[in-house]
Amino acid sequence: MRAAEQQHIRVTMALCGRALQKRLASSRNILTPTAVCHKRQISEDPSPKYKASVQTVGHVLYTQEHFALKDSLRKIIDQEINPYVDKWEDEGQFPAHKIFKILGSAGFLGVNKPVEYGGLGLDFSFNVAVAEELGNINCGGIPMAIGVQSDMATPALARFGSAELKKEFLLPSIMGDKVACLGVSEIGAGSDVASIKTKAVRKGDEFIINGGKMWTTNGAQADWMCLLANTSDGPPHKNKSLICLPMDLPGIQIARKIDKLGMWSSDTVEVFFDDVRVPCKNVIGQEGMGFTYQMLQFQEERLWGVANILTTMENVVQATINYTRQRKIFQQPVLYHQVVHFRLAELQTEIELLRSLLYHCIALYIKGNDVTKLASMAKLKAGRLARELGDSCLQYWGGMGFTGDVLVSRFYRDSRLMSIGAGADEVMLSIICKYMDTLPKK
């Protein structure tokens, strides 16, 4: 994408963002479908998809600005990402700095981040629109890596970090000049975040960090890590801090690149820390509040993941419809067998129900409500539906579904992570039960 076109997109979205902010400040009604900057189009050559979408009246969550944002992102996906996905999947890594710079220059890495640090200053519903559109990337690894940058490693920094930290780490991350990763999971502590062992011991005006992190997305290419570490010996929910950790410091070792079942184009590593020294000023917000900050980050991460996989599931269903319509068995298309088209109808219904739950959750969240229970429900349902949908659709592809040449087989591999990452299904169930007051009493 030409630099001039990138700048045009970014400036236009920023203008729309400021106009939208003024409207929200006066009306506080995000569900109003009226456009603010209807005379400004992000795309100079709108696709048929965009022309249809902007005429949508009464969408439960999105305005014309949301659809314009999605349309502009789709052009970047079609031009800069999808043509190279197969190559990056084979290589086991995509060029994060290159892709993030393209996305950052167009404004997509800081949609709801502060304008003074390069963001667009919009609300989280725009992040969801971006996450949905990223589902059109023909693999799961690249959207996941982008989500780590925009909605997993940076929310706490944007919300609680000092001005100095935001300038050093948030601004270049939003602009795509630095790649971020999130250091939470460890070998013995994945979903059980309170059990992490990595320690940061204060010595003078520095912390000395020892320990390690596992399953670190973007870790092989990251310039900095949002690290969760124990900074005291207090209670496990009150002794942790989030720290901005440059990845080029002495004592940081990338132990190995992990070979995964899916998400091949996303690099995932194990990291060790051996007496790594970092300034105490690199703590995000208040020392000892890291667990709480991370739980807040998890809510946005889970909602982002649900939005992203919705689009991919819809694409897999449509690809299956197209394939089964032209593939014949017993003298008629596979699609014409009742068991097939009924099953696809059931799956599409499940997708729409999940989308309704997501939009309801987002509408509440952007108004300041606690959506922990609903977000956990959406995350749980998304993971289970993805497994069910991937298995059902792959079956209808027959032998082709067992190859690595089609979207459905890649989705089958990639989507399995949805029920594990960012809190396993069982953790989501425990959270839901806690809100239902059905957990056993201690």
Image (cartoon, rainbow, N blue to C red):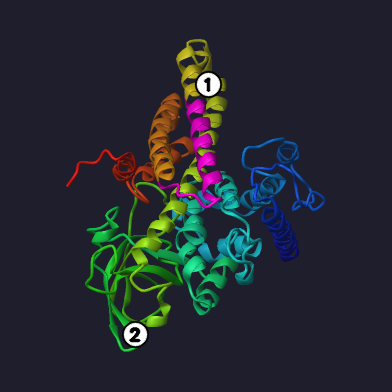
Tag on residue 206? Answer: 2
Q: Residue 357: x percent and y percent? A: 49, 37
- In this rendering, the count of numbered labels is 2
- Which mark, residue 262? none
- Taking the spot 19% from the left edge, 44% from the top edge, the residue there is 441
Residue 220 x %, y % = 41, 66
Q: Residue at x 40, y 39 (%)?
A: 377
Q: Tag 1's secondary structure?
A: loop
| Alpha-carbon span between mark 1 and mark 2 | 64 Å
**Residue at (50% x, 73% y) in the render:** 169
Question: What is the crowding at mark 2: few (fewer than 14 residues within 10 Å), some, or many (at least 20)?
Answer: some
Task: Look at the picture and state if 213 lies above or below 327.
Answer: below
Q: Which residue is mark 1?
A: 327
Q: Quadrant of residue 48?
A: top right
> In which quadrant is the N terminus drawn?
bottom right
- Disc 2 marks which amino acid? Glu
Q: Residue at x 29, y 74 (%)?
A: 231
Closer to us: 9 or 434 = 434
Residue 406 visible at all: no
- Decide which of 148, 378 is in the foreground and name it: 378
Q: Estimate the x, y position of residue 39 in percent, counting from the top left.
A: 82, 51
Q: Is residue 437 visible?
A: yes
Kind of residue at disc 1:
Arg
Q: Secondary structure at mark 2?
A: strand
| N-term mark: 1 or 2 | 2
Residue, far bottom: 204
| Residue at the far left in the pictured view | 442
Which is nearer the eye, 85 or 297?
Answer: 297
Give the residues in magenta: 347-372
Residue 354 sits inside the magenta stretch? yes
